[in-house]
Amino acid sequence: SIVYLPVVAALVFQEALPIVFAAMIAFSQDLKLQALACEALARLAQTDRPAVVRGCLQACLSRHSHLAVGVCCQVLGRLSESGICHEGQILDALQPLVEGQPEHLELQHHASAALRRLVADQVVEASTAKRRVPQLLSTQWAHLLARFLGADVEEARERSTFHADVQVLFHEEVVRHFEYEASERCLHLLCHGAPGPARLCEVLRCLVENLEDYRGRLEARQMAWDATEGRLVPLDIGLRQRLSAEALAAMEAGLLASLQEASAAPGEAAQRRLAQRTARLRAECGALLDRKTEVTHAHQERAEELRREVMLFEAVEYLELQESRGEAIVNQVRTALHMLAIAAPCAPTDAVERLRERLSRLPGGHVLQAAEQETM
């Protein structure tokens, strides 16, 4: 209500804009608040329409929240419908914002998402946007930026998933191996006429030996996946005891089944049944090993895809293709150089040099690299 008068709007304009946008982003699901905020912005625009558009883009696109893009497009759409702003003002504000901060990867990605949505909503004409800021309409470039920005989160998620999967497979393998070994020993004793008590003792001996082997494998490890915390933690005495107890609990069902088979009356039927069980368990153990290999291979492939230099090679290929079409954008080359600066400390030296050399051949690449080296 305080911005209904133009003279008041002029006084509170600079302070009110960021507050309004912060509220809209924080309560994006509150439709009443969104409507009131758009009305307030329309009133503020009485003072300086281009400044409101510019303030909207600056306040929303530089934020980390993914909701900011939606809020920005909503506001610009409402202002456009009301005749308060037009596509020329939007692009006049967006173009210098993007071209002036090529190193701000999140802003570049948000600006691309915002412009593509504004084009889809017919707030901005596609032909006009393509003429002014064509790089922002490229879904491929936006996808590359999104992957690069999200690499840390994706790497952490991938590591967590991999360690959790391997831990589950490892425990299942321990259980199945015990059942298989117990079944194999019982079959051997049964074929040699060993009495029932001897077979039962052998199952218990097999259980103890497998538990000792499992504990030995734990002793050899420094870290283990803690499912309760969802991360790798130091493998201390307490965690070793807990994991051993979990392994024993998981073996209980197999122990009962093995004792039941061991106590069966001697005969061809018992031998045949035990031989079938042994063969099945052997196949299951092999399948678990194959599955663990597959999970490890898939993790390695995914980890390779998430390497920054791999993404950068894709970005350079995209830029080289754009240059061959006469559509190369110097601003994108500047962004790629900044991405390279981020990736360089963790990337192989030869890969960094190849990327630098290829970027230097792109429009503005050589000059930009020289300028960056002077400032370092």
Image (cartoon, helix red, strand yellow):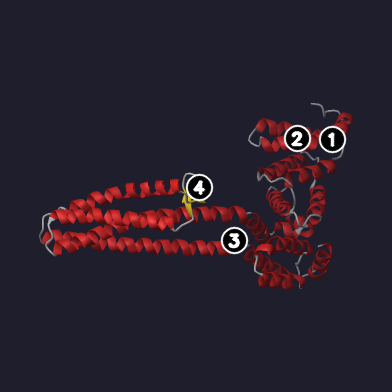
Tag 1's secondary structure? helix
Q: Residue at x 17, y 59 (%)?
A: 273
Mark identifier at residue 20? 2
Question: For the residue carrying disc 4, how many other residues have a C-alpha within 10 Å: few (<14), some (14-19), or many (20+)?
Answer: few
Q: Check if mark 2's residue and mark 4's residue have beta carbons within 8 Å.
A: no
Task: Single out the mark in the foreground, 2 or 4.
Answer: 4
Amino acid, disc 3: Leu
The answer to which of 92 and 210 lies nearer the viewer is 210
Mark 1, residue position: 13
Mark 3, residue position: 306
Q: Which of marks 2 and 1 is nearer the N terminus?
A: 1
Q: Where is residue 35 in the image (x, y as percent from the top left)?
A: 70, 33
Q: Which residue is drawn at 46% across and 57% down?
A: 221
Mark 4, residue position: 230
Quadrant location, the N terminus: top right
Q: Earlier in the sequence, mark 4 or mark 1?
A: 1
